[in-house]
Image (spheres, rainbow, N blue to C red):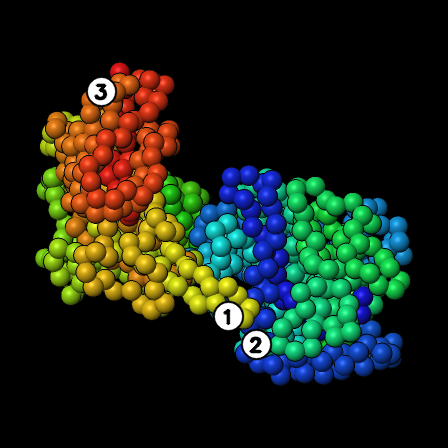
Amino acid sequence: MKKVFILSLIVISCAFVLNSQTNNNIYLYPADEMLLRQKVVENPNLILEYMIYEDNLKALSNKDFTMLKTDTLINGKRVIPVVFHIIHTYGVDNISKDQVLDALEKLNIDFNKQNSDTADTYYLFKSRAANCNIEFRLAHIDPNGNCTDGIVRHYSPETNYAYFNTMKKYVWDPTKYMNIFVVNFIYPEGMALPDGAVIGGMSPFPPDNPLSQALTGGDTDVDGILIRHDCIGTIGSAENFGNYPINMANRNFTHEVGHYFNLYHTFQNLMLGLIPATSGCPTFLAPNGDEVDDTPPVDVATQNTSLNCFTPGSRNTCAETPDEPDMIENYMDYQWGYCNNIFTIGQYQRIDGALNGYRRNLWSAENLHATGVIEDNPVECAPIADFFSTTQYVCAGTEVNFYNSSYNGTATTFNWTFTGGMPASSTIENPTITYNTPGTYAVTLEVSNAQGTSNITKTNYIHVYSTTTNNTAPMSESFETSSINDFIVINDTGSVWQISNGIGYSGSKSMYLQNFSGNNAGSLDEFITPAYDLTDLPSGSAKVSFKVAYAGKYVAGTILTPADTIYDKLTVYTSNNCGETWQNRLVKSGEDLATTSPLEIEFNPSSTDQWAEFSFIIPAGLVTNMDNMRLKFSFYSNGGNNIYIDDINIASLSGSDINSQTLAGNEIKLYPNPANSDTKLYLELNNSYNVSIQIIDLNGRLVNDVFNNKMSVGSYNIDINNVDNLATGIYYVKVRLDNNETFLPLVKQ
């Protein structure tokens, strides 16, 4: 349907929310809608700028392009040079060349109407299906005139919080290449994504479109397709979109390239004023939608309610003349990718306008020669050296596996140098090296083939630690006399863990992370303690406890968005092998992490009331072998507030301590233990609390919810129900008083 403005959810992304427990509740999350609507509120003139732009575009579409030279058509098609930037951390996000080639093949099939599922197009729309006559080819010459296979790989944690700044950082000249930025997670700046939200892709329209200018600030280098790795192709990581067994059939990629060529969603519309229309159905004030004549209007994005596709022709959400069903199979709607199969002739005309407008240089003869795609013959380039290892942190005497990850050309020779390693050099592709002496060491790899040689050195890459420690438990870390250099600090970007002077729970110092500002949402910040020997603790379990001060960030509502509170996540791990592997011991997120009320301003605790104690138990069977135990505190930023950690304690939990503990000044007793049908939990409360009591197993899994309610000052005896139904073994009673919690071992014989 022909439409005038497209404010409601127009730009450029496919966003999904998958239910964390089941994929029976799958729906699309309109992250981009909020971004663009906010831009319109900030600049009402954007509507007028958009209308002028669309009027000019219509004039261009009426121009007779047959008089233009067609010497850059190859086999009747316009060829587009493409470069893939794979931004990764050596995980599943570092997709294979085969997956890239598969994606490009499927993209060419869709844009040339060669897809077999055109048979599923509703009969009324079959005659409208368009062959866009475009061929996408990997570039063979890079911007510096060097040989390339069109796939560039960049190691960066930014893959986990990618946005437009990521595109700008790695872009090749966007007037010469269609840039594809493949990442792990897309996180729009200034937006707090709900738990489980997954944005499949975000792609600005051509930079001359004022809607793109509003989003990118007019930066013409922010141009291309930003997309998740599991939305590229149909093989490899694409077989499990969002860690679910869903294959999107490369159609997210097709959808995003549609935006790149100036296509809008089929459900777009405009209300004349500051607020976009809530419906894509035409009205007097909002008649024009996606600016295409042959796509019927759609009320809202077509969102699948299961993994099944809607039957083409089965939905008609708008009444118009002539009245036609929704074209739910269109690539620019929001069904699962495998449900889509058509670009229309009207959409092709709009794509054609982009290719004869801002995108024209891409397929010019000069550019096809400059990027090496005038002929699509495979080329072999010199390799670009890269590598990774299974771990960077090990105990002395440990083997480390190294893996060649070179790209751009197939390496035929390998020359490794391992300072501090045994052996100190190797010529095999993926060697295994032993490090016997504590220290920090560099690794160098040189690769070559007939076309050339490349090398890379990663300094301070391997960290080797002693297998013994002088730090014995019980222990307490108050940070009062410690230096930040006593800890291993790992930082993605932005703010970094530091020791705060002037703020602490029991003293004047604590470990602190500035997260309210200066830290990227989606980033990870970690600190690792020195090693501790727990084997001298009395027999029984060990209790690890620490104080936390944290507040969520309150975000006031606007005329477009409701008020919200942003929370981050803290995870605590233990390792007994110098950090080679880690075991998850405690996770706190959402309100469970908060120790005081949310704040709209930066949080800095001003009293001990704003702190809480968190703890976890290390079972006796593990304690007896923990002679080199380290703690890792890992903070995942969701764009929330600051966090403080203080008074880390490791103590024995045995004898009378098993049945009696003190939490936030409140006495807790569990008796009798070993448990029977008469076992009770005694609480002596000195204040009113939200009290939660649960039974969990040794792996932290919930076995039984015992109690969850508000309790006032007083003494209480709470029955531990269903003890007789427990299998023989050791469990824990998890007691939570507001945000303070502890664990008491429960033995069932």
Q: Earlier in the sequence, mark 3 or mark 1?
A: 1
How many numbered markers are drawn?
Answer: 3
Residue type (three-letter) at the residue carrying disc 1: Thr
**Do tag 2 and tag 3 residues touch (Cβ < 8 Å)?**
no
- Residue that label 2 marks: 41
Q: Secondary structure at mark 3?
A: loop
**Do tag 1 and tag 2 residues touch (Cβ < 8 Å)?**
yes
- Residue that label 1 marks: 558
- Distance from the alpha carbon under mark 2 to that under mark 3: 64 Å
Of badges 1 and 2, nearer the viewer stands: 1
Q: Position of residue 580 (x, y in %)?
A: 30, 41
Residue at x-position 89% and y-position 62%: 322
**Left or right placement of residue 683 versus residue 697 in this view:** left
**Screen quadrant of the N terminus:** bottom right
Q: Earlier in the sequence, mark 2 or mark 3?
A: 2
Q: Is residue 281 above or below residue 18?
A: below
The foreground one among 261 and 499 is 499
Which quadrant of the figure has residue 261? bottom right
